[in-house]
Amino acid sequence: MAKKLYVGGISYSTSEDALKSHFAQAGAVESASIIMDKMTGRSKGFGFVQMSSDADADKAIEMFNGKELEGRTLTVNEARPMEPRAPRSNTRDAGRGNW
């Protein structure tokens, strides 16, 4: 069964292909994605890698957690489901006046 990994500390210049290639050293990678800021189009410095098996995912965590990629120290662990968040309020309408 496939396991999704959270990868933090990714360099802003790292591509999804480079991330996928790096994690392929630990086993079969189904997908790799880097989360991008919607406003700037720039990497947010974290992403997700889907490994083909639990064994490959465990090996990737062991191999890459705390190790460097492109000059940045990675944090690699099993991804957790996103927790629900409260709706964002529009700060312009929050009684602060017009900007």
Image (cartoon, grey):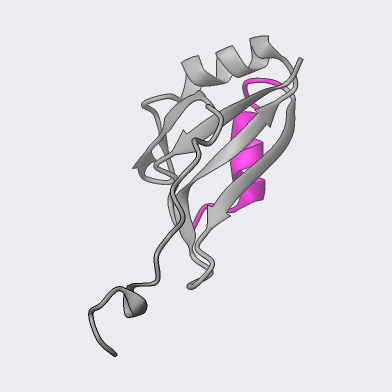
Query: Camera-side residue: 25 or 39?
Result: 39
Residue 38 appears at what percent x and percent y?
54, 67
Q: Which residues are magenta?
A: 13-27
Residue 95 appears at what percent x and percent y?
25, 77
Q: Residue at x 50, y 19 (%)?
A: 61
Left or right of 86, for residue 36: right
The residue sitting at the front extreme is 95
Q: Quadrant of residue 29?
A: top right
Q: Is residue 68 above or below residue 43?
A: above
Q: Is residue 93 above or below residue 9?
A: below
The residue sitting at the bottom extreme is 98
Q: Residue at x 57, y 14 (%)?
A: 59
Q: Is residue 41 above or below residue 95?
A: above
Query: Camera-side residue: 38 or 50?
Result: 38
Q: Quadrant of residue 21?
A: top right
Residue 70 appears at what percent x and percent y?
43, 46
Q: Is residue 23 magenta?
A: yes
